Image: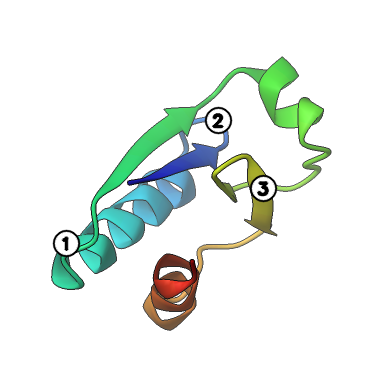
Amino acid sequence: MKNIQVLGSGCAKCIKTAEIISETAQALSINVNVIKETNPEVIMGYGVMSTPAVVIDEKLIHSGSIPQASQVKEWLVRE
């Protein structure tokens, strides 16, 4: 199971990002644990300056925009 954090203030873009990740994972039958992280200290700990940001298994992989479903698919199928 992949642990995925969506970093951000809880704004509409952050919520949409979490939805896209969950929906894409479900369509691919991949188990994920999606957590919405709003703590500014945690967010800054990853060096994120623009949200929403996505962290998969403790590695920052995206920030600053809502990812496309095709991007999310690529992230999820990587080992």
Percent x, y for residue 53?
61, 49
Q: Which mark is residue 26?
A: 1
Q: Residue at x 24, y 61 (%)?
A: 30
Q: Which residue is the extreme one toward the bottom?
A: 70
Q: Residue at x 46, y 45 (%)?
A: 14
Which class describes the residues within 10 Å of circle 1: few (<14), some (14-19), or many (20+)?
A: few
Image: 29 above or below 71: above
In the picture provided, is 30 more to the left or to the right than 63?
left
Answer whether residue 10 is visible to the viewer in this image: yes
In front: label 2 or label 3: 3
Q: Amino acid at mark 1?
A: Gln
Q: Which mark is residue 9?
A: 2
Image: 78 above or below 54: below
Quadrant in the picture for residue 77: bottom left
Percent x, y for residue 3?
43, 40
Q: Which mark is residue 59?
A: 3
Asked if the residues shown at circle 1 and circle 3 are in contact, with their CB atoms under 8 angstroms apart, the answer is no
Q: Earlier in the sequence, mark 2 or mark 3?
A: 2
In the picture provided, is 31 more to the left or to the right than 45?
left
Instruction: Assign a secondary structure to mark 2.
Output: loop
Per the model, the C-alpha gap separating discs 1 and 2 is: 25 Å
Percent x, y for residue 27?
16, 71
Q: Amino acid at mark 3?
A: Lys
Which class describes the residues within 10 Å of circle 2: few (<14), some (14-19), or many (20+)?
A: some
Asked if the residues shown at circle 1 and circle 2 are in contact, with their CB atoms under 8 angstroms apart, the answer is no
Q: Earlier in the sequence, mark 1 or mark 2?
A: 2
Answer whether residue 63 is visible to the viewer in this image: no
Q: Amino acid at mark 2?
A: Ser
Q: Residue at x 35, y 40 (%)?
A: 34
In front: label 1 or label 2: 1
Instruction: Assign a secondary structure to mark 1.
Output: helix
